[in-house]
Amino acid sequence: MVNGQPEPAPSRPPGGSSTLRAVLWATLVVVIVGLFAAFARQQWTAAMRRDTGSLDRFNTVPAFTLTERSGRQFNSAELNGKIWVADFIFTTCPGPCPQMSAKFFELQQEIKRSSDVRLVTYTVWPEYDTPEVLRRYADRFKALPDKWLFLTGEKKTIYDLAHKAFLLGITDKESGREVLKEGEFVHSTKMALVDRRGQIRGYYDATSLEAVQKLLGDIGSLLREQPAQ
Amino acid sequence: MSASATAQIADTRGLTPIAPRSIVRFGMLTFLASEAMLFAGLIGAYIVLRVSQGEAYFPTGFVKLPVRETFIATIVLVASSGTCHWADTLVAKGKRGTWALFLTIVLGSLFLANQANEWMHLKHEGMWFNTMGTYASNFFVLTGFHGLHVFIGVLLLIASWVLSLLGKFDGSNHNFLMCASFYWHFVDIVWILVFTIIYLW
């Protein structure tokens, strides 16, 4: 406009060549603008992730079928797409189990309004901890039936989950030899955080004072990292 | 058309007859198409693995790629394509275009320097061809092949620069520069794809 240049330059060869040229230049502009936009988006997401502190990645929990305290069959597919926290206890446990379940109760108070978060307690003594026994234990901790699940069932299923997926130790009479009596277990006091895809993303010691705070923070990170579908 | 082609063949410099521009262009584009296959395979492998494994494709302890630095290097490479095109245009108008070529060589070398620096950084962080699974080896093989192409491209540009300094090009005959320029644009386009897929996705 300033130069008053006519649009098709007179020196250009005739035919479709100048159209092709225009298309190529337009493509170049689009690509460069797109590149800047994609870069800006990537930087933004990275900043968000830094902000929330990205979580580690551990094993993925395989599919399993157990029995819930209500007595119904429980398929792990129900946890697909949910963020959940798992722990392993037994109801007659004199030591840290009540403490672990107390932590879960604290968590439940915080997450009960979220439809995306669940708490899952496995028993390490399924022979004794029938759904009925678990139900009484759950009531002691005011566990909400749809938020906090208690699972019993085949011992091998539970022990395989603990040992192979969660990498948490359980020792009983059979594996602990004469040290342990019937109904005595040595088990981990760790709680595990599992993401929407079933991948374990963190471990928290239930005996630690800051466990619940840290878990809540990391559940928040996961909710931001994997927003609801 | 055929008259001008014959005229080009008849026009010789020293002992070497000059091939018609259209034939040289066709040969070069065919070669670049085969090059594109190579990169399609490598980029395809990355996409397939990434899609099938999702976020799990990035190994535990995943090292963050220096996206910002590489983005700047990408802009440098795109700019070098611009200066290369500028050189080509100048030579077609009968000028030498040595400064434009020199600038292209400098920008291309800057890209390579950044890549060398990035590789050393990643190696220092524990990410290398044989560590951190298929992600890392895919990354290094893909960017490595591309880096090798940039290196060859810089050599071709240096050769073009020398030829231009020696006055070997003129408006109607600069096939060597045309091929080097095609090659350079090709390497640039491949990089935009690689950068978008590996760094921004």
Image (tube, coloured by chain):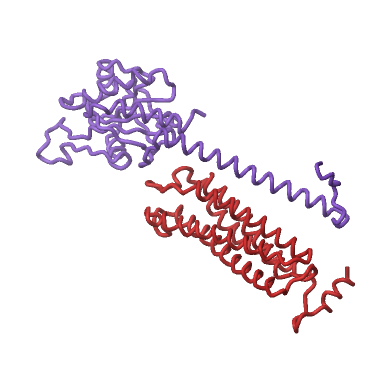
> Which is nearer the eye, B14 or A174?
B14
* Image coords of residue B68 (percent x, y): 50, 46
In the rendered image, the quadrant that contains the N terminus of chain B is: bottom right
* Image coords of residue B33 (percent x, y): 67, 62
In this rendering, the answer to whether A63 lies above or below B117 is above
* Image coords of residue B47 (percent x, y): 55, 50
Image position of B48 (left or right of A140): right
Q: Residue furthest bottom?
A: B15
Q: Residue furthest left?
A: A178
* Image coords of residue B130 (percent x, y): 40, 59
> Which is nearer the eye, B185 or A4?
A4
Looking at the image, which residue is at 49% across and 28% down? A228
Image position of B68 (left or right of A171): right
Chain A, which colour? purple
Q: Quadrant of residue A179?
A: top left
Q: Quadrant of residue A98?
A: top left
Looking at the image, which residue is at 38% across and 25% down? A118
> Which is nearer the eye, B15 or B91?
B91
